[in-house]
Amino acid sequence: HHWRVHFRKQRHGYFLLNPYSCYDICNSKYLTDVYLRQAGLRTPKTVRITHSEDSERAFKELKSDFPIILKLSLGTQTGIGVVKIDNMRTLHSTVQMILLLDKKLPLLIQEFIEIEYDIRVMVLHDEVIGVMKRSVIKGSDFRSNVSLGAEAEKMKLTELEKEHSIRASKAVGGILTGVDLIPSKDREKESP
């Protein structure tokens, strides 16, 4: 997106900075993954679970070893609805329990990528306006949400990470977005 000076239409009395379609995409982790992949960006391997007896098929399709991550695809609530799963029995029973409460809840599984930290990048149009390094929560957690107690500090992005963050923001049609990325081993040369 190039710089735009017009305001977005109000919807039900609220001013929207991002297009409504952007909210729709980003409200679904699965859809976000689809759009990022279409833009040629690397994402963790992701498979949808479609019903309460679908765990085994989904796990086979994931082509990953345990542990894996089970996520509620819906919403942007920080780190809530994200569970690390160690075996098929736990996956199956957790999926069954969640879908017993509401069989329409969209679930997905992802490969687990061990990290010490991830990076939250704030992108406005074609520009990175803020960067935060988020260390994984100390103790036995694996999440990096600051709202759940993770440490945050300033850090500098590589040109490659900047470019990919802007591409990710554009991929979902965003004007102002928060892009989360896992840095690669060689941050200068290898895509995050």
Image (cartoon, rainbow, N blue to C red):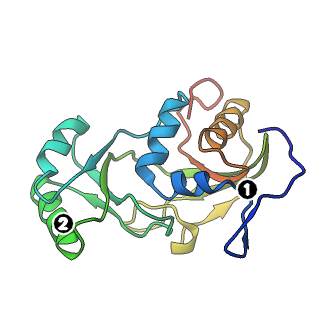
189 sits to left or right of 142: right
* Place of residue 97 in the rendered image (x, y in percent of width and height, measured from the top left): 17, 71
| Tag 1 residue | 154
Label 2: how many Cα within 10 Å (few below 14, some 14–19, many 20+) = some
Q: Quadrant of residue 171?
A: top right
Q: Residue at x 56, y 40 (%)?
A: 183
Q: Is residue 89 left or right of residue 66?
A: left
**Quadrant including the N terminus:** top right
The residue pinned by badge 2 equals 94
Image position, residue 93 (x, y; %): 12, 65
In this view, the residue farthest toward the right is 5
**Taking 176 as reference, is 14 above or below it?**
below
Left or right of residue 189, residue 46 in this image: left
Work out how far the residue at label 1 is from the one at label 2, CA to CA, in angstroms: 37 Å
Q: Quadrant of the C terminus?
A: top right
The residue at the point 90 percent across, 50 percent down is 5
Asked if 11 appears above or below 22 in the picture, the reply is: below
Nearer to us in this view, 9 or 64 = 9
Three-letter code, disc 1: Lys
Kind of element beneath mark 2: helix
In the image, farthest residue toward the top:
189
Q: Decide which of tag 1 and tag 2 comes sooner along the chain.
A: 2
Of 149 and 101, nearer the camera is: 101
The mark total stands at: 2
Amino acid type of the residue that numbered disc 2 sits on in the rendered structure: Thr
